[in-house]
Image: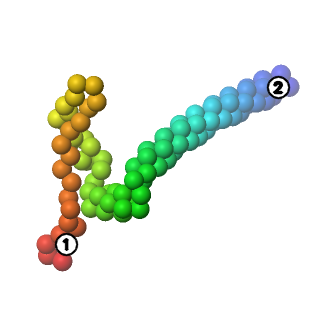
Amino acid sequence: MMKLRTILWGGSGLIALMLVGGCFTYGTGYNAGRTQGESNGRVISEAMNAGPGAASAWSIIMALNDPVRALAACKQAISTDDEGRRSCSLPIWLDPFPPPHGS
């Protein structure tokens, strides 16, 4: 009887530990995703403040370029102005990708 009680308490403790860990992990991931989503929303809203023409221009730039790769290349050659704002030359494609050869 004592062995069964020990096994039940141990199992209950393990389940409780897993529940606490799972809730903590879920909460942390949810909060990080929400924070990142809110930040991205503010950035996109700022980018679109110049009107419908700006929205159209940004959509073309995003459709024709890989922003992750372009930003990584941009970070290789950063310059800073007198006020401390950073900038770089960002090469962007203005035409669609050509179709793959042999298709």
Label 2 to label 1, Cα distance in Å? 68 Å
Q: Which residue is mark 1?
A: 99
Q: Are marks 2 and 1 in contact (CB under 8 Å)?
A: no
Q: Quadrant of residue 9?
A: top right
Along the viewing direction, whichever of 20 and 70 lies nearer the viewer: 70
Please report whichever mark, 2 or 1, sits nearer to the chain's N-terminal start.
Answer: 2
The image position of residue 13, as x and y in percent, is 73, 26
Q: Which mark is residue 5?
A: 2
Pick out the residue farthest to the front: 50
Determine whether 48 is above or below 87 in the image: below
Give, as a three-letter code, the residue at label 1. Pro
The image position of residue 77, as x and y in percent, is 17, 35
- Tell me the crowding category of disc 1: few under 14, some 14 to 19, or many 20 or more residues within 10 angstroms, Cα based: few
Q: Residue at x 18, y 50 (%)?
A: 91
- Mark 1 residue element: loop
The answer to whether any part of residue 33 appears in the image is no
- Tell me the crowding category of disc 2: few under 14, some 14 to 19, or many 20 or more residues within 10 angstroms, Cα based: few
